[in-house]
């Protein structure tokens, strides 16, 4: 805080941890860790009378996640005697709005996501849209000091206040793109440390706040590639970031200067939708296999176990075998087709419409395999080193992404309702 | 010309999701001259990548050379959507291994070993 920032911002979310969290409305970070971090941020913001903006609160930015974050903030405000005006910006999109967008041609799948039907939209458990800067600008205009955003384009918490002050949106968004990953763009990179950015009229500069890290031309340029499809054109709500003319210059003291990035507004304005649906319930069993006679014929043995389980389990669902030491990581894409480890790790997975059927399929496959008499078997006591008792682990609900679409909107603020609170006043 | 293991000339070889429907691979080279040669011979083609991963050419979405980072980026369709039943790598972070076996034909650039680190 000695550097007197004008803003504290954080991107709290990602789709990387997969569809479960949006499906269940749960955070992928622990409550105690979030509370610890938020306490530092809120105290710093209030002491310095600057905004604190949280993007994609609670990991996936659904209503439940925003409210979960609000609850933590309320507790911290009370504990520390902090008072401020807070905005909650929700990003949930009602199914009717999405269906209407589909009917009126305002919904486009983001390749390679498939086309969608109204029935498929109906199956979604939750749908969120990535907000652009506009809803955050509105909350800032309402003098909110703490802004908790639902699903949010990652750079927005950093770029919105800069855009409000009249800075170039290309530079503001590119700065946000780097800051949202904390110090990952520094060298050595880390998602743990904070970064200070200073925005000027025609460029911005970055400096790591941990003396062990520094920004270089190459570390910053390389970060542009991270988790993107095309590093020259980065699409977002309301426009695309164009890096074709961007220059990165190393400065003294581990700082870097970035200039030349342009923001190309899109017409019409689009937002990205993310939706998930239930895929069933899962039960797994984990076991090791060390017998070389069994390992040699693992494919044919598992095929037979699958056949017998389908016949005998009396349940409907999918049975999956993940064979670590063979192709557990890459599946069908594994190029090493013939090499097997001296021991295999096996995860038996059943996904079925209800927990009972998932348990039945998993148990049937596990017990059949445990005692299966494969050709040449000389170890007759059991084929699996089961890792746990109980051997079968119910994993609860399974979700899958089913909406990953661009939706045209007339008003970039209207889909994102804002609720304003006076905290501790 | 000689075949050089990619692990000798790359500083970073990684895979990651680019959204839940795509897998993206980055190879960052240590040396600008080496990077220019690889870009000039267009070593990373959709055909080569498809063969390496046992997928069809159509599943390779984009291959981009990114000069500011001496890097090439290859993006393909995820075989299974992230976290859906049957997916084996939710973050897509361990799909890079086949790239490590690539041998790239290069003209001799200098007798000195390639720099071990980049900055």
Image (spheres, coloured by chain):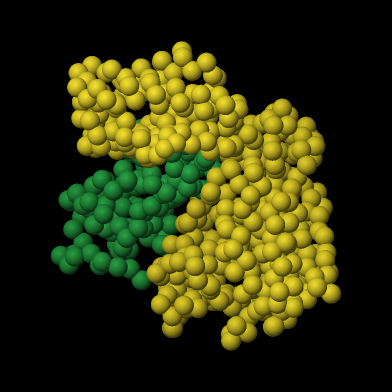
Chain colours: A yellow, B green
Q: Image quadrant for the N terminus of chain A?
A: bottom right
Residue at position x 39%, y 69% in the image: A188
Foreground of the two, A371 or A60: A371
Residue at position x 66%, y 58% in the image: A57
Image location (x, y in percent) of residue B63? 43, 46
Image location (x, y in percent) of residue A382? 29, 26
Q: Is residue B80 left or right of residue A271?
A: left
**For residue A401, what is the image quadrant?**
top right
**For residue A108, what is the image quadrant?**
top right
Residue A132 visible somewhere in the drawing:
no
Q: How many marks?
A: 0
Foreground of the two, A267 or A208: A208
Q: Is residue B102 left or right of residue A88?
A: left
Q: Is residue B32 left or right of residue A133?
A: left
Image location (x, y in percent) of residue A292? 20, 30
Above-or-below relation of A402 to B117:
above
Residue B116 visible somewhere in the drawing:
yes
Above-or-below relation of A126 to A363:
below
Image location (x, y in percent) of residue A151? 68, 53
Q: Residue furthest bottom?
A: A2
Q: Image quadrant for the C terminus of chain A?
A: bottom right
**For residue A51, what is the image quadrant?**
bottom right
Q: Is residue A272 left or right of residue A14?
A: right
Residue at position x 57%, y 58% in the image: A30
Foreground of the two, A207 or A342: A342
Residue at position x 25%, y 67% in the image: B115
């Amino acid at each position: 805080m000695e550097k007197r920032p004008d803003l504290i911002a954080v991107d709290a979310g990602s789709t990387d941890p997969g569809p479960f969290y949006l499906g269940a409305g749960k955070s992928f970070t622990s409550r105690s860790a979030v509370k610890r971090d938020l306490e530092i941020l809120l105290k710093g913001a209030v002491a310095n009378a600057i905004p604190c903006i949280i993007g994609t609160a609670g990991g996936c930015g659904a209503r439940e996640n925003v409210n979960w974050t609000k609850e933590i903030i309320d507790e911290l405000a009370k504990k520390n005697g902090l008072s401020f005006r807070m905005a909650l910006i929700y990003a949930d999109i009602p199914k009717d709005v999405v269906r209407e967008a589909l009917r009126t041609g305002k919904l486009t799948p983001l390749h390679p996501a498939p086309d969608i039907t109204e029935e498929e939209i109906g199956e979604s458990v939750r749908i969120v849209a990535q907000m652009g800067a506009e809803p955050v600008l509105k909350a800032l205009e309402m003098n909110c000091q703490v802004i908790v955003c639902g699903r949010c384009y990652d750079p927005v918490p950093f770029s919105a206040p800069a855009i409000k002050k009249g800075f170039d949106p290309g530079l503001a968004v590119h700065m946000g793109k780097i800051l949202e990953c904390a110090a990952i763009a520094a060298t050595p990179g880390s998602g743990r440390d904070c970064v200070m950015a200073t925005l000027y009229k025609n460029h911005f500069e970055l400096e790591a706040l941990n003396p062990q890290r520094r920004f270089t031309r190459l570390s910053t340029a390389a970060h542009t590639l991270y988790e993107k499809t095309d590093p020259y054109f980065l699409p977002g709500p309301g426009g695309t970031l164009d890096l074709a003319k961007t220059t990165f210059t190393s400065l003294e003291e581990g700082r870097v200067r970035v200039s030349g990035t342009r923001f190309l507004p899109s017409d019409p304005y689009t937002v990205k939708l993310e939706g998930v649906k239930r895929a069933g319930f899962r039960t797994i069993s984990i076991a090791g296999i060390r017998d070389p006679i069994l390992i040699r014929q693992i494919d044919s043995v598992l095929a037979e176990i699958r056949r017998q389980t389908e016949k005998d389990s009396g349940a409907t669902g999918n049975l999956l075998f993940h064979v670590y030491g063979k192709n557990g990581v890459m599946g069908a894409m594994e190029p090493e087709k013939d090499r097997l480890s001296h021991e295999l790790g096996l995860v038996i997975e059943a996904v079925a419409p209800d927990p009972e059927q998932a348990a039945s399929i998993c148990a049937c496959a596990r017990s059949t395999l445990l005692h299966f008499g494969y050709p040449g078997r000389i170890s007759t006591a059991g084929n699996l080193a089961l890792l746990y008792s109980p051997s079968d682990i119910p994993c609860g609900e399974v979700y899958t992404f089913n909406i990953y679409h661009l939706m045209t909107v007339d008003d970039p603020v209207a889909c994102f309702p804002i609720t304003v609170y006076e905290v501790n006043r | 010309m000689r075949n050089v293991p990619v692990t000798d000339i790359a500083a970073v070889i990684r895979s990651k999701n680019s959204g839940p429907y795509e897998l993206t691979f980055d190879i960052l080279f240590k040396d600008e001259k080496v990077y220019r040669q690889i870009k000039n011979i267009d070593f990373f083609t959709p055909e080569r990548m498809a063969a390496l991963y046992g997928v069809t050419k159509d599943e390779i979405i984009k291959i981009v050379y990114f000069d500011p980072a001496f890097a090439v980026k290859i993006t393909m369709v995820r075989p299974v959507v992230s976290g859906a039943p049957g997916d084996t790598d939710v973050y897509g972070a361990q799909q890079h291994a086949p790239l490590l076996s690539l041998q790239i034909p290069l003209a001799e650039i200098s007798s000195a070993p390639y720099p071990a680190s980049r900055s």
